[in-house]
Image: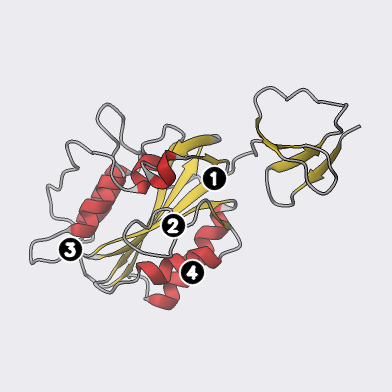
Amino acid sequence: MPFFVFFPGDSTVAIVLSQDNPQNIPYGNDYRERKPFETGFPVRIFHFRRKKTTVSAMTIRFFGDNSRQGTYALFVTLAETARLAFGKFRSGTRFLLDHEACLYVGSALGDGPSATPLARRLVRHASRSPGNPPHRIREPMIEAFTKNGLARAGFTPPDRKKLHWHIDYLLDCRQAELSSVFVIRSPQRLETTLSRHAAALDETIEIARGLGARDTKNETHLFGVNDLETCMKKLENAIGLICRPCR
């Protein structure tokens, strides 16, 4: 008879098999074969889809000053488990995304008296490649940015979006929906500080070292999240230590 090993807080169960007792693989569950370990028996690792719980309302939260530059956190909910390659990252390896959501930390610090780098970057994130509908948060985002002076009246989203950054591939995925954004309006380079706060949270999981951080060595800026609501509250508190909320 096989015995089962559960990993607390994870959607993974290891089924340890005896050599003479192969088991049928349950339909619809992803699995990977593992080599025998200390028991001398082969192991099959199954990833079961966990029930998703999401924050129902879209959130666009502003922090900092009146700068049009800044750092941001994107919260992306996942409707179901997905396998996704992030462009050429790790030679096109497809990663299992069986989390409730994902968290991405980025920045847009372009300068110039007429530049609106933060608004343009975030609205680009809320868009998808040609032929795919934008994220539902895009129009509320444009309205909020115009109202708060982050973008000028008449601001328009990009006509065509080409996938470039690691986050682009996630945001173009049909299972993913950009649900909430934290916007830090500041010319200071806060991306590393914020990503380290994110990495230290109990609710975040490192999908792969270096993911989402093409321009930064030895860092990770794109994480899985297993408790979105708690993660958002904790990250908001962390941002409050970095800069004050906009009033």
Residue type at numbered disc 4: His
Circle nearer the N terminus (3, 2): 3
Residue type at numbered disc 3: Gly
Crowd around label 4: few <14 · some 14–19 · many ≥20 (10 Å):
some
Circle nearer the N terminus (4, 3): 3
- Distance, label 3 to label 2, CA atoms, is 23 Å
Residue type at numbered disc 2: Gly
Q: Nearer the viewer, mark 3 or mark 1?
A: 3
Question: Which disc is residue 197 wearing?
Answer: 4
> What is the secondary structure assignment of the residue under circle 1?
loop
Crowd around label 3: few <14 · some 14–19 · many ≥20 (10 Å):
few
- Distance, label 2 to label 4, CA atoms, is 16 Å
Q: Residue 233, how many percent across, how many down?
A: 52, 63
16 left or right of 206 in image:
right
User: Residue drawn at (49%, 57%), measured in percent from left and top?
Assistant: 209
Crowd around label 1: few <14 · some 14–19 · many ≥20 (10 Å):
some
- What residue sits right under mark 1 in the picture? 54
Above or below for 10 versus 105 = above
- What residue sits right under mark 3 in the picture? 110
Circle nearer the N terminus (3, 1): 1
